[in-house]
Image (cartoon, rainbow, N blue to C red):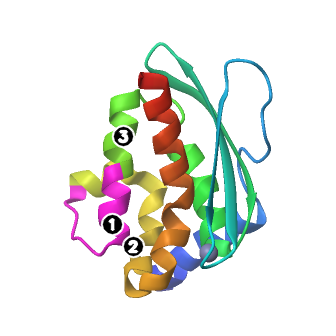
Amino acid sequence: MDLEELYRQVIMDHYKNPRNKGLENTSGYIKLHLNNPSCGDDMTVCLLVDGDIIKDIKQDGKGCSICCSSASVMSLTLIGKKLDEALSIIKLFYNLVSGEVLTDIEEEKLGEAVVYKGVSKFPARIKCSTLSWKAIEQAIYEVKK
Ligand code: ZN
């Protein structure tokens, strides 16, 4: 099995079995909604922070497989991280899907999110892959204000 096929399987697994799916209305969660009209993607994320640590992320939305699976991967990648660490991982993800070459250490920080490397070959899908990451980034900035 080649790497691209493996990546495709991971993406389909997250699309079919999304992690941390659903909305959280409990107080303490910051909710942020974004959409991507060009594809019809619509994503809401809920962020719970304790001190400067991300305690929980919930995500819910509808859209294409890239958008929905990416929200699931994003939640797993960022839960447990410090806010500044999460912001730097989010930047690395934007670099990855824009086709920038990352170092091994940078790829390690991204963890499973490296499966979106191939998105850079499909410029129209970049926005799909980053929608949930943009939403959580804005929510983090809300917390830091
Ligand atoms: Zn999409």
Q: Which residue is mark 1?
A: 96
| Circle 1 SS class | helix
Look at 36% across and 40% down and name the residue there.
Answer: 87
Name which residue type carries label 1.
Leu
- Left/right placement of residue 99 relative to residue 113 reads left
Spot occupied by residue 32 in the image (x, y as percentages of width and height): 63, 42
Residue wearing tag 2: 117
The residue drawn where x is 53% and y is 36% is 139
Mark 2 C-beta closer than 8 Å to ligand 1: no
Query: What is the quadrant of the C terminus in the image?
Result: top left
The alpha-carbon separation of the residues under discs 2 and 3 comes to 19 Å
Q: Amino acid at mark 2?
A: Lys
Q: CA distance from mark 1 to mark 2?
A: 6 Å
Q: Tag 3's secondary structure?
A: helix
The crowding category of the residue bearing disc 2, from other C-alpha atoms within 10 Å (few below 14, some 14 to 19, many at least 20), is many
Instruction: Say which residue label 3 marks.
Output: 87
Instruction: Tell how many labels.
Output: 3
- Queried on whether the Cβ of the residue with tag 3 lies below 8 angstroms from ligand 1, the answer reads no
| Left or right: 2 as drawn, with respect to 79 | left
